[in-house]
Amino acid sequence: MSEQSLSSIQLNDEEIDILENDYDSLLYGLIHFDKPEDLPRRQFLLMAIQFYEEKIRNEKESLQIAQYYINIGHWHLLLEDFSKALSAYQAAYALDTKLNQNPEFLFGLGIVYHHYGADNHAIRAYQQVLYVDSQFLRRSDVHLRLGLIYKKLGDYSSSLKYFQRALGDSTSTCSLTRSELSYLIGFVYEQQGHLTEAENLYEKLLQQQDIISTKLEGKILRQLGWLYFYAPITNNSNTDNLNLERENQIKKAINTLEQACKSDPTCGITYYYLGRCYAALRKHTEAFYTYRNCVDKLDQNADVWCSIGVLYQHQNQTMDALQAFVCAIQIDNKHAIAWMDLGILYETSGQAQDALFCYKKAILDKDESWNPELINRINQLQSCLAQIPEGAIGKQPRGPLPKVEDAFTLPIPVELTAKQQQMATTSSATTSLPTPTSTNVSNQPYISSSEILPPPSSSILTSNIKPSIDVIRIDKRLLTNDQSIRPKRIKTEPTLSFTSNTSSNDLQKIIKHSSSPLPPLPVSYLPDGHIPKPPPIPKMTSFDLNPATPSVILETRREATSTQLQQYCFSQPICIVRGIANVLKLDLGLFSTKTLVESQPDHPIEVRTQRQQATDENFDFTSMTTPLKNVWKYQSTRSYTTIAKYAQYQAYSYHDMVKDELNEPILPSINTNSSLITNSNMIMTNGTSKKVTNNKTSNTNSSISSIRIIKSGTNVDLSDERKWAAQLSELTKLPLFMRVVSAGNLLSHVGYTVLGMNSVQLYMKVPGSRTPGHQENNNFCAININIGPGDCEWFAVANEYWGVIHTLCEKNGVDFLTGSWWPILDDLYDAQVPVYRFIQKPGDLVFVNTGCIYWVQSIGWCNNISWNAGPLTYNQYYASIERYEWNRLCSCKSIVPMVHLSWNIARNIRINDRHLFELIKFILHQSLKYIQLTLSYLEQQFGRGVDVRKQLRTLHEPAHYCITCDYEVFNILFITEIDRKHVVRCLDCALQYDKQLENVVVLYQFTLDDLKTVYDQFQLYLLPTLNSTTRSITNT
Ligand SMILES: [Zn+2]
């Protein structure tokens, strides 16, 4: 291509204006280029890209170049050329890191990451869009996309949350219709096992036939029909009618699925479901017919082949059945049902050895509750086979079917191989695309533009016809539901640079001058306004990855109450304090199981059912690989019982364990009744249980080991001062900085009970009870005392490494903030993360400092008590407010309402630490600014249309959180009614719910004058003398 042809492209000012203002990532998914009439628009964009590449070559100013790259990135995105879009976005970010505050850029980048399946990157980009612009024009699409990613990751509660937010948002443009969103919600309900909700939702959607497309109708009918088929029968008072009822249910399902086929004849899954229904009614011909239909429409589906195998088996076509099961397993190696069915097929053909092999494959990733009969059958088969002399097995007559190892080498039926080839080509096509792997987009330097942006195909260049501007004009602002054109947001918030001397009057003057028609965006409470992010990997200060745990042994009462102890605890990431119970004469017996049962037997306790493992192991029991691999994801299930019942279990498990030790080796016993009191030994077969590390021998031995299922009791709430008076008063013997309540403890100023934080929680444990890895809520400190009689083992990592652990969590598919994880120690050592590891004996107190990450496992039988504390220091306050912002970014609730708390601190305490004072004053400043901007917006926009009513706070009234986004709502509450209950929303969510605020009541809890007074009177407290304590309490 010659230079001339490039320079011949010229765009006039109007065209440039349209391109730069109307064509950006916001249009993605709303305009298309695939129809012939779109060709001029497409050509126009391609030409624009060339024109801007030329501009880049002639530009020196790096920020300007970055802007050109963003434009090019957006246009490639609109043309769905994702790899070029990614390159351009990366080039832009490399030149201008401030782009992480540009929502259009972040949205485009998120879509590209999403396209390539870089889920964690996409999540981060989307979350940042909402963080920097909570009123983003494509907000509901961002929610939808987050919902889709979490659905894919199997995190259904997050997925549901985002789908609901997309649906509840009436003012932003979404690329899916409300019915489509509702369908997705129904689908998630199904995955969560909320079948009634799903059914009701689907049925409701079908009633709106005039507004749903036939394709969507087909999907809904398909899910509904399938749900009728698999949902358990409910009112079965008369067991005689059970079969009849079941039959009617299946007929209803068939009816619905047939309708689904009519609405959408192209969907293979519908045919599969229909086939399953026919098979269940033993209508084999119909079933075969529909499965055939399904194989034609679905590429690769193990379920279909498995079902076909079952049909063949019913017809006694064993060889056909075998091949169908093998097909299923070849598609999905972990298909337990296919393995089990294949095993049954072998067993009915008299090939016990092969059957046993398949059965073991089937239960490999299951726990004992999945199929107890199968586990019994395995044991029986094993003991039968064990009685056959060693050499005799090979000499057994050959069964009618090929042996299992040969079955997988049989020629595959032609139609399946064709399918597999097709699969192979499509999958390689999708994986060969470049994927963004670097954690930081700026890491990947932009390769010279000629490499990344090759010249477009000649047809465009040779056609010198320039598309006319009429076909091009798309004003994206018209695409919103909003009839009034919404101006692009220009920073209209007062750009008042904060100093701690700024008075409330200064603030108000500036706000009065700013008149924005848009609602104010949430303010950042971080002093430099940066977007919170995990810290980078700390520079190594020591090479000791197993540092000695800081510990203190107390010998006198004086030592326990000394300031040195406090200073030491505050200076270490974590610290073990020994002998404190002794020197302070704490009666820990008050927290023993015996006392608890005597005093409050019916008190509720949360139970976590988990597997007992060695403290440094966390095996993935869902994997098929041998030996079992360690993973980060840690699973437990939740239930509830009472203290008395748990105590009984605790005692029983103790006697049981002692008995087991006397009777080694453990005989495998299967207990299907998993009530609290039963001993739940379970077996793992095929040498894959925890004991097996040398798999070579174990695979042949088929050894059975024992994995114990245990129940640990957590989160027993001891906040009730009447119920737990003796216990709580005992803890007042502790030094001030460790106490549950003290004037110098930030959490004592929240003003209401935050369970487990400013109140005591109790844990009741058996050996192996785990507290998975976490940081405390809002990075507060924690105090934990082991009551005994057994020990606990602790693992801890200093706060500055949370970024590293966050990254490791992402890599391992667990959510750092909300997930349940047990770190693999080797992964931490490989990442150069020092890990404290120590034993907490009865009477030992562990002080967990700000932001320390830790995970704990009990070695023996013991109880623990714990609570949080917030030292009045700059470090603690900053860490808490930073986590507050990080939580907002991640759409997680901050359990400690930092804004509410800051106003209380300003009222209650005089601060003499300048750093801390300025931080709190800044938070108040931001809060006051937001309140004033909100009031000013309401007045300008609605005038008398919105009534702002006063409703003062009651004593111990908890802080408020938005029902939609979980963000703290301070002072100005937007109240709506849901199911006759009043719920609170933030301004943004209230406007999304009801744009005119017609059905919203606006309340305020403090007058502006009151807050201004508190703000102005909150001043640095200069100590009269030099040697006073670090703070002064005015209100205790
Ligand atoms: Zn909200």
Image: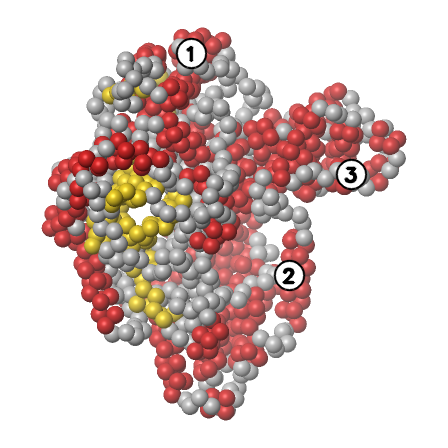
The answer to whether the residues at label 3 and label 1 have Cβ atoms under 8 Å apart is no
Residue 399 screen position, x and y as percent: 51, 87
Judge left or right: residue 191 versus residue 867. right
Q: Please identify the quarter of the rendering in which residue 14 is found.
A: top right
Mark number displayed over residue 423:
2
Query: As rendered, which of 413 and 58 lies closer to the eye?
Result: 58
First of labels 3, 2 by sequence position? 2
Q: Is mark 1 within 8 Å of ligand 1?
A: no
Q: Secondary structure at mark 1?
A: loop
Marks 1 and 2, how far apart in space?
66 Å
The residue beneath circle 1 is: 502
Judge left or right: residue 444 versus residue 954. right
Amino acid identity at mark 2: Met
Q: Please identify the quarter of the rendering in which residue 965 is found.
A: top left
The residue beneath circle 3 is: 450
Judge left or right: residue 941 versus residue 707. right
Query: As rendered, which of 739 and 40 lies closer to the eye?
Result: 739
Residue 193 screen position, x and y as percent: 39, 53
Marks 3 and 1, how far apart in space?
52 Å
Please identify, in this view, whether the residue under mark 3 or under mark 2 is nearer the observer. 3
